[in-house]
Amino acid sequence: MLKHLHLLFVAVVIILFVIRVFLAQYKPELLANKWLKIAPHALAGLLLLSGIALVFEGNWLSGEYGWIIAKLLGMFGFIALGLVTIRSQGDKRWYAFAGALLVLIYIIRVAFTKQAFFFL
């Protein structure tokens, strides 16, 4: 149940991020809506809390846990690139957006493989 809730938060965060990027590009005035300012932070918090709960539920700290740290660092990278994406304009926005999507792919891949350096 907790895993499905976590995956739901992942999906909602990704979908809302893509929507916010396109709003920033084509309808930036809509980003002034209060719910579009608060929702990403609330969802990211819920995503983090559900992830922490999964770590303890799965007893994953008792073994090799470098992949958990890699996912957490990836999340910080995604947040940083997301901020650049929303606040920038032109090519810089799209490069940051592509970078954020690549970080998301990395995080998802680490979640499946449980290996921080799966590409080596």
Image (cartoon, helix red, strand yellow):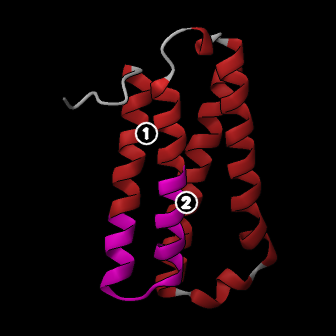
Q: Give the residue at mark 2.
A: 79
Residue 1 visible in the shown view = no
- Residue 4 coordinates in the image, percent (x, y): 64, 25
- Residue type at the position of mark 1: Ile
Q: Nearer the viewer, residue 68 or 100?
A: 68
- Residue type at the position of mark 2: Ile
Magenta region's main secondary structure?
Answer: helix
Q: Residues within 10 Å of mark 2 (few under 14, many from 20)?
A: some
The N terminus, quarter of image: top right
Q: Nearer the viewer, residue 90 or 55?
A: 55
- Residue 31 coordinates in the image, percent (x, y): 66, 81
Give the SS element for disc 2. helix
**Which range of residues does the magenta coloring cover?**
76-98
Q: Nearer the viewer, residue 27 or 73?
A: 73
Q: Give the residue at mark 1.
A: 107
User: Horizontal placement of 60 versus 117: left or right?
Assistant: right
